Image (tube, rainbow, N blue to C red):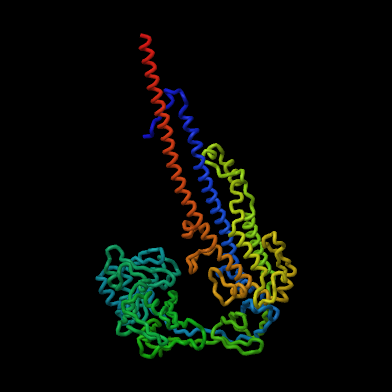
Amino acid sequence: MANMRISGLASGMDTEQMIKDLMKAESVRLDRTKQSQTQIQWQQEAYRELMTKIKDLHTKYFDLLSPSTNLSSSASFSKFSYNITSGTSASTAVSVTANADVSSRNLVINNITQLATKATMSGKASEMRGVAKTDFDFAAFRTGLAGKDFEMSLSIGSTTKTIKLNQTELGVIQAVYNAGNDDAENAFAAALNTKISQEFGDNYDNVASFSDGRFEFDQPGTVVRVYTFGSNVESMSALGFTNGQTNVDNYSKTINEIFGLTDAQIGTININGKNISLSQEDSFAQMMDKINKSGAGVQLSYESLSDKFTLRSTTEGSANSINIASGSGAEVLMSKLFGVTNFADDEFVSEAGKNATLQINGVDVVQSSNVFSHDGISYNIKELSATPINVGITVDTKAIVENIKNFVNEYNNLIDAVSNKFSEKKNYSYKPLTDEEREALSDDDIKKWEEKAKSGVLRSAPELDTFLSKLRNALIMPIEGVGISLSEIGIASSSYLDRGKLTIDETKLNEKLESNFDDIVKLFTQQSDIMYNNGTSAQRYKESGLGARIDDILKDYVRTTRDDNGNKGILVMKAGMVNDASVVQNELTKRLLDYDKRIASIETFLFNRENYYYSMFSSMESAMSKLQSQADSLVNMLGS
């Protein structure tokens, strides 16, 4: 419960107001300390705002993840227009891309006589798919029915229907069997398909099938599932199926369950000289994964619609064959996957990889891949062509100029932002509002006041002065090994008073891109062999192109990684970067925490001081009350 203070009763003085007035004078130091803390907080916010702008510029124009706009990378100058024609029409047989070293060029692809292919092995259907029973025999099936009608629930996709053959219908098929006709199983499948078509529609007339002793239900492209109908468990049992069995069950089964293979047969297989350890307990997915990640240079795939496996080399070309030793565990496994008895089976297909063959500018060219590079041009051949293909490569100066213009605009915006903060005048008449002053103002008035009070919080900050100077010098200092400067290509700093802002003469820049393209690329993208570190060496600076120089400077100020001395970027160490540990570990935050301690100390002093004043006035009131009481007693005595 708060202390209740009643004062001024004996003296008649407004001691409450007197104490408030005394405390107002005492609180001046607290207000000034809080104002100083607010100034530091505003400085931190201003620095962080500038860091965001610096980081945005760096991310867009100097980040390895943005190659098309990264001015320190030749990729940002690899902007070309391509004209690929055969006769008078555009050709789709080949596409090309050029890097910045190419400049403009014309060439002729005289012909494309062969495309590169991958070595491939395949066969017939693997019987991975389908709700199936091997060694199906109609007579055994009838015996299993135990005199009951055949009944089952069949689900195709999201639709489930009842399929039924009564004793009369089964008797027709039995007559076929009794006549010694080996086609009873096919007759059974045909009868089922008639029923299925009646229930599901005309397109479902081949769901049931029988071949080489294998009876199955299957519909490519969808899930087929069989269920026991009611209490008639004999029908499913006679077929040899389990309740809920589906045509995709094999995906979760083991190699042993699917193919009947054991560890002794396929414990270790060898493909292209690479040993691959398999287990009979490996699932279908695990088997695929082990082979594909083995490093054997092959990719095993399964296509459910055709129910076929295919083994391909991972790369094109005649040198990239698939080698599987005859009689080995690998051959045993692959013969199962390809649905053949052995690799000599007529239905087994093995195609060797082929090289791409073409002629460029009259020279015969052989490549192991359809995608290849030569003399700074990347080719992707897609079709054969007996007629010549003309390829015209032209530097897209418009796109390059646009990228440089965008950079200059955003660079100038950054220079403006930094130099404005550096030179912004301070409004000494506007200080941070005290708590009492804030209470007396509206939110709008507080906002207007603080806009003026925040002016000049970074005025003459040495970090900003150095930052601007470094950027300006980076643009005008010569680069070793580069015989051209920014000013020579139409980009210049108008005045020192602009703190290094740039202007562009687009006409001159376009002309120079046409005549000195390679030199301009080098001016921006030349790299030093000396690695970047904090406090970059003078030699790296001399050798670096403009892109690397600006990249280094921006990193020096907003880098969140630490150097060998444990330091991050200059502004990061000063004010901290949001979403980084430095947000609470920086110079200004330490100063703010120090102010917190000073404010807490002053508030404790003021609390004690206020109690002291109340105690002092209380003692005075008590003394005056006693004096008044004694005076009243004396008057009473004299009056008597």
Q: Toward which corner of the image does residue 147 lie, by quadrant?
A: bottom left
Q: Is residue 76 visible?
A: yes
Residue 394 visible somewhere in the drawing: no
For the residue pair 640 and 145, the one nearer the viewer reads as: 640
Q: Who's the residue at 70% across and 67% down the image?
A: 491
Residue 139: which quarter of the image? bottom left
The residue most toward the top is 640
Decide if residue 636 is on the left or right side of residue 45.
left
Question: Which image quadrant for residue 634?
Answer: top left
Query: Is residue 11 positioned above or below 422 on the image?
Result: above
Residue 136, percent from left and from top = 31, 78
Is 359 placed above or below 521 here? below
The answer to which of 633 and 141 lies nearer the viewer is 633
Residue 13 image point, x, y percent: 47, 25
Camera-side residue of 467 and 131: 467
Indicate left or right for 182 with 598 as reference. Answer: left
Instruction: Look at 65% across and 67% down and name the residue there.
Output: 473
Comparing 420 with 141, the one in front is 420
